[in-house]
Amino acid sequence: MSTVQLAPSTMTRPSARWLLLGSLALNLFFIAFAAALAVRAPAPAPAWDRDVFVRAERIADTLPAADAATLRNRIKASRGDIESAQTKFRSAQDVIRDTLRAEPFDAEALRASMANARAARQAFDQTIQGVFAGAAAQMSQPGRQALADWPPGRKSASGKP
């Protein structure tokens, strides 16, 4: 009887082994890269300015030229009223913050300051909405359509972009 040694079926060529190691190293690199992206600092919040005038300008930029001028003129004419309403609302918010920080805490005072803030917010909203309603009354149909569809790319109630 002769002894025959058989080559194991799992024996691979040296170049295939290097290819496997290279593939493994590349996969580890991509996994590490993905993990680094996942743990990095969060992306900044979308730019949504608290300043109503900046937002109004962004809206005007999306309107037809004549309608944008109409909106800008209405905003300019009402600037004092808008600033006053906005200042009152922000002051009311500050009172809420101060009430929350107060020692001893007074829940009734907090409820009262929240009610004042709601009223100030409503007055602010009515001021802004009045300006936009007045401007819209002077705009063309495409300008009103652009207002209705703001921000750009937003789907309307009818489902059309």
Image (tube, rainbow, N blue to C red):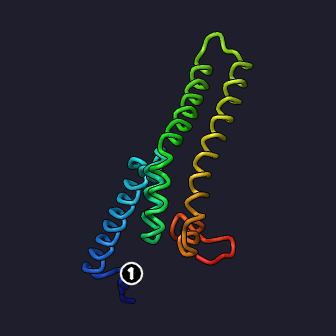
Q: Residue furthest bottom?
A: 1
Which residue carries the number 1 mark?
A: 8
Q: Is residue 66 visible?
A: yes
Q: Does residue 138 appear left or right of residue 113 in this picture?
A: left
Residue type, label 1:
Pro
Residue located 64% across and 32% down the image: 117
Q: Position of residue 110 (x, y in %)?
A: 68, 23
Residue located 61% across and 52% down the image: 129
Q: Nearer the viewer, residue 118 or 23?
A: 118
Q: Position of residue 120 (x, y in %)?
A: 63, 35
Q: Nearer the viewer, residue 117 or 133?
A: 133
Residue located 61% across and 58% down the image: 133
Q: Residues within 10 Å of mark 1 (few under 14, many from 20)?
A: few
Q: Secondary structure at mark 1?
A: loop
Q: Position of residue 161 (x, y in %)?
A: 58, 76
Q: Residue furthest right?
A: 108
